[in-house]
Amino acid sequence: MSLGVAGVILAGGTAQRMGGGDKGLLRLNAKTIIETVMERLSPQVDRMVLNANGDPQRFAPLGLEVIADPLPEPMGPLGGVLAGLEWAKTNAPKPSHIVTAAADTPFLPADLVARLMEAARVSGGPAMACSNGTLHPVFALWPQHLADDLARHLASGGTRRLRAYACERHNAALVDFPCSPEADPFFNINTPEDLQIARERHQREAM
């Protein structure tokens, strides 16, 4: 457990390549994709919430508090970051940081939070995961003090891109994670073919 860090699972996508709906609620063998993400993230954080819009009752079986984007216009994943930071600002004990993770990425690193926190302690700002030269903006650590800045930024029409906001505005630290085609910790499920690959990999790793 990483004291002072809350996990925010981002589940606001439209899953168009999966036929719509909440792809995180699809089964990854015995459990849903989101439940598998929760299992990976839970030991690394103090507590977790789920960011999603629409009727929160569809996620009730997960037992997580569901927080919606705070702005009326869709802002993509950056809106989910703001939702998490606003939630953290008003919920005691107030975490110093939130870590965001995608709801469709069931193999996220077991040391994600520890390594992002180490980088953030040096930089004082956000930290983002990367692997093999590819940035994974959804997997990032965000200091709670950025809440007001991000709210003003989005309200004034600033960029909605995670990468641009974190790297260009706040000089985010980049943390490189080991990765191979067979064991990509940031493999995400976008298509039915991806889901089958994830199921097979999940079964292998459980053996």
Image (spheres, grey):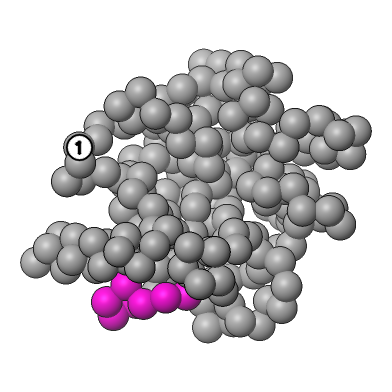
User: Is 202 included in the stretch rendered in magenta?
Assistant: no
Mark 1, secondary structure of its residue:
loop
Left or right: 46 as drawn, with respect to 130: right
Instruction: Identify residue type, mark 1.
Output: Ser
7 with respect to 83 (left or right): left
In the picture as drawn, the residue positioned furthest to the right comes out as 156
For the point 49% across and 41% down, which residue is it? 139
Which residue is located at x 52 percent, y 36 percent?
Answer: 137
Q: Residues within 10 Å of mark 1 (few under 14, many from 20)?
A: few
The image quarter in which residue 167 lies: top right
Name of the residue lying farthest toward the left: 207
Q: Is residue 190 left or right of residue 199?
A: right
Residue occupied by mark 1: 180
Residue 82 in the image: state x and y as whole percent.
73, 45
Q: Nearer the viewer, residue 199 or 122?
A: 199
Q: In x, y percent, where is residue 176?
A: 35, 26
Residue range highlighted in magenta:
25-31
Does residue 104 appear in the picture of this structure?
yes
Above or below residue 18? Residue 145 is above
- Closer-to-camera residue (126/79): 79
The quadrant of the picture occupied by the C terminus is bottom left
The x and y percentages for residue 4 are 57, 43
Image quarter for residue 147?
Answer: top right
Is residue 50 visible in the rendered image? The answer is no
What is the total number of numbered labels drawn onto the structure image?
Answer: 1
Q: Determine which quarter of the picture holds residue 158.
A: top right
Q: Looking at the image, which residue is at 56% across and 71% down?
A: 20
Give me the residue at 56% from left, 16% from top.
123
Q: Is residue 55 left or right of residue 103?
A: right
Residue 162 lies, in percent from the top left, at 62, 35
Q: Nearer the viewer, residue 72 or 9?
A: 72
> Image height check: is 102 above or below 192?
above
